[in-house]
Image (cartoon, rainbow, N blue to C red):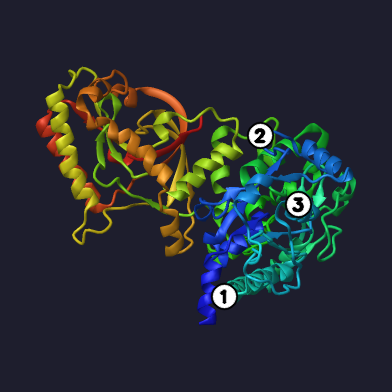
């Protein structure tokens, strides 16, 4: 009965988290429903935080400021004894917290500890009890039962190394005071420890490269605290002047040059992968930092940038994946495959090659594109799934297409590489923002369709779409395996004539990884739905289907360009037969209207690169 009453009280708790890492920890402990207040930087796991309100603000906007400007603002605030963050006092009072989780380890990361305590004292008459890292017990209710005045408990978590990070799960659980939450903490930390042991085992017999971890570009900060432990687990020899549990410190460019590490890992505090890439290429690609290009790691392409916001800056559950990324970056693809996608997420880091830095490119755009796709981490293989209900579709200009339900995650990652690592590419064409394969185009001299003809064409597409997307067991339909991407220089837009082709083979990380990277997000599905739904109204769609342009001559006339595609050659046998039957049905109904592209040229375009 006591456990039941405690569980009921836990369900009624109002929790405020003032640090993104704590928010992640609480969610791992199964307490997401009790979180009523979060910071403006708490963005993971997003789907579990939709009901929580933001209780903090900050005058520092990392999206509009350079690293040097951010560093200057931070140093100025701290030297004046000011907190970088503010509490929205009225909002905090409105959510009526029973427990507030915070930290006092780093005033750069969250609302300063004294601000939290003074705000609680002024607004709510508390805190009555201050729980630090030892996890002293805490009553479940933050309300004085005699007066009804809110009196929240403030729990400060202070991890300085990897062991402390694991301890914070237990400290948080103990503060809640529920046996079920404590059991969950044991489960979560056991899983993390098992993952760390897998990483140790994978690298134990490998040479330890001399490695540097840059936590900030301008000026250079050495990674500190738990970073030191993570690098040790990952099999690296950390050369930067930081002791275990020690704070991050500034190092001069001259001293960094003297270190000349074998591998450089870059994860600036609070920045995602795209911002990290941008700053790395701009700051270390500038003329004033020409010294950077003399380093052996830079010349050898052994610089890796990571999503620090997810995997390094937040002392929580995802430090496990951060450690796996370190191991893969230092020891190569074989270790990444051994550890698998669950420990080494391919979306979490990029390899920076020498030619990627700002300045005059030493290679053609086609070579650059191929290098971007083949760089570490390897892009996982995946499959394309024809769109259920409407796999065959008449696009604008009357073009007949095989439509997919959306770009799978693997191909989204490939497209993102172009966006992030080749920022000088021209804007992506609309046509490559939704995945399709062009099957046929209208003859140049063909007359316009009537509404009745378009309706009949839609019926034929629907009948044959059902064959493609429905199997006998009514489960998944036909899938098209994507085991390689191709960067091509073409002599005709339909890719029936090529001047050059470079194939980049995608990696097999196992069936579970392929399943994951074949998944299509809601965003991607919506992009396709918006296109396909246009022909629900044939009257308004008819002018678009009859619009001039993209006739067969535009696909076959001489035209030079470059693009990245996934070729469908060879087609799955079953799909090949279905498309043959579809072609016959169209040609029987509309003789001499369509010219079908050669099967060997059929492809799904990721994006143009010329």
For residue 494, side relative to residue 89 (left or right): left
Where does the image place residue 334, in percent across and percent down from the top left?
58, 64
- At 30% from the left and 22% from the top, the residue drawn is 553
Q: Which residue is mark 3?
A: 122
Disc count in the image? 3
Where does the image place residue 291, in percent across and percent down from the top left?
83, 41
Nearer the observer, disc 1 or disc 2?
Answer: 1
Label 1 or label 2, whichever comes before in sequence order? 1
- Label 1: few (<14), some (14–19) or many (≥20) C-alpha neighbours in 10 Å: some
Q: From this viewpoint, which residue is outermost toward the left?
A: 588
Taking depth in this image into account, of 313 and 465 the one nearest to the observer is 313
Label 2 or label 3, whichever comes before in sequence order? 3
Q: Which residue is mark 1?
A: 187
Q: Is residue 343 visible?
A: no
For residue 295, side relative to residue 16 (left or right): right
Q: Secondary structure at mark 1?
A: helix
Spatial separation of the CA atoms under disc 1 and disc 2: 51 Å
Spatial separation of the CA atoms under disc 3 and disc 1: 38 Å
Q: Which residue is mark 2?
A: 362
In the image, residue 546 above or below residue 372: above
Label 3 or label 1, whichever comes before in sequence order? 3
Where does the image place residue 360, in percent across and percent down from the top left?
69, 30
For residue 432, side relative to residue 573 (left or right): right
Where does the image place residue 587, in percent across and percent down from the top left?
14, 33
Taking depth in this image into account, of 152 and 534 the one nearest to the observer is 152
Nearer the observer, disc 3 or disc 1?
Answer: 3
User: Circles 2 and 3: CB distance less than 8 Å?
Assistant: no
For residue 520, side relative to residue 108 (left or right): left
Q: Secondary structure at mark 2?
A: loop
């Amino acid at each position: 009965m006591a456990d039941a009453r405690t569980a009921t009280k836990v369900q009624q708790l109002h929790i405020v988290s003032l640090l993104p890492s704590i928010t992640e920890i609480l969610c791992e402990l199964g307490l997401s429903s009790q979180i009523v207040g979060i910071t403006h930087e708490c963005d993971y796991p997003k789907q579990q935080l939709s009901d929580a309100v933001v209780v903090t603000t900050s005058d520092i906007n990392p999206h509009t400021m350079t690293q040097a400007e951010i560093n200057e603002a931070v140093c100025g605030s701290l030297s004046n004894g000011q907190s970088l963050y503010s509490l929205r006092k009225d909002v905090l009072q409105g959510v009526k917290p029973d427990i507030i989780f915070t930290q006092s380890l780093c005033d750069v990361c969250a609302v300063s500890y004294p601000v939290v305590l003074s705000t609680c004292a002024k607004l709510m008459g508390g805190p009555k009890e201050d729980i630090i890292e030892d996890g002293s017990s805490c009553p479940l209710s933050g309300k004085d039962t005699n007066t009804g005045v809110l009196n929240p408990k403030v729990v400060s978590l202070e991890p300085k190394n990897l062991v402390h990070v694991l301890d914070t799960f237990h400290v948080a659980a103990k503060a809640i005071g529920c046996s079920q939450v404590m059991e969950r903490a044991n489960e979560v930390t056991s899983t993390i420890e098992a993952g760390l042991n897998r990483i140790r085992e994978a690298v134990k017999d490998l040479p330890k490269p001399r490695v540097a971890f840059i936590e900030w570009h301008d000026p250079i900060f050495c990674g500190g605290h738990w970073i030191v432990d993570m690098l040790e687990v990952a099999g690296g020899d950390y050369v930067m002047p930081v002791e275990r549990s020690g704070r991050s410190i500034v190092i001069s460019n001259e001293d960094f040059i003297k270190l000349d590490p074998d591998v450089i890992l870059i994860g600036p505090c609070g920045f995602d992968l795209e911002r990290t890439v941008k700053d790395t290429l701009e700051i270390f690609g500038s003329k004033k930092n020409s010294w950077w290009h003399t380093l052996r790691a830079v010349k050898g392409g052994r610089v890796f940038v990571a999503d620090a916001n997810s995997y390094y800056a937040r002392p929580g559950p995802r430090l496990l994946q951060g450690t796996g990324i370190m191991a893969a970056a230092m020891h190569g693809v074989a270790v990444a495959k051994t550890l698998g996608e669950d420990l080494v997420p391919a979306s979490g880091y990029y390899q920076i090659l020498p030619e990627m830095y700002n300045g005059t490119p030493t290679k053609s755009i086609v070579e650059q594109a191929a290098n971007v796709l083949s760089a570490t981490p390897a892009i996982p293989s995946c499959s394309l799934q024809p769109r259920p209900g409407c796999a065959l579709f008449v696009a604008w200009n009357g073009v007949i297409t095989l439509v997919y339900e959306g770009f799978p995650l693997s191909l989204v990652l490939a497209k993102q590489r172009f966006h992030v690592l080749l920022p000088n590419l021209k804007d992506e064409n609309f046509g490559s923002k939704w995945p399709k394969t062009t099957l046929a185009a209208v003859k140049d001299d063909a007359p316009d369709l009537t509404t009745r003809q378009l309706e009949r064409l839609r019926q034929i597409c629907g009948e044959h779409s059902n064959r493609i997307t429905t199997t006998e067991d009514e489960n998944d339909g036909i899938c098209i395996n994507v085991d390689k991407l191709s960067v091509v220089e073409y002599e005709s837009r339909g890719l029936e004539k090529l001047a050059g082709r470079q194939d980049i083979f995608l990696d097999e990380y196992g069936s579970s990884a392929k399943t994951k990277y074949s998944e299509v997000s809601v965003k991607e599905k919506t992009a396709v739905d918006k296109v396909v739904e246009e022909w629900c109204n044939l009257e308004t769609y008819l002018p678009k289907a009859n619009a001039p342009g993209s006739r067969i001559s535009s696909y076959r006339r001489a035209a030079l360009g470059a693009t990245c595609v996934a070729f469908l050659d060879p087609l799955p046998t079953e799909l090949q037969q279905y498309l043959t039957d579809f072609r016959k049905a169209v040609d029987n109904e509309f003789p001499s209207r369509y010219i079908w592209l050669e099967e060997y040229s059929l492809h799904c375009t990721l994006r143009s690169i010329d």
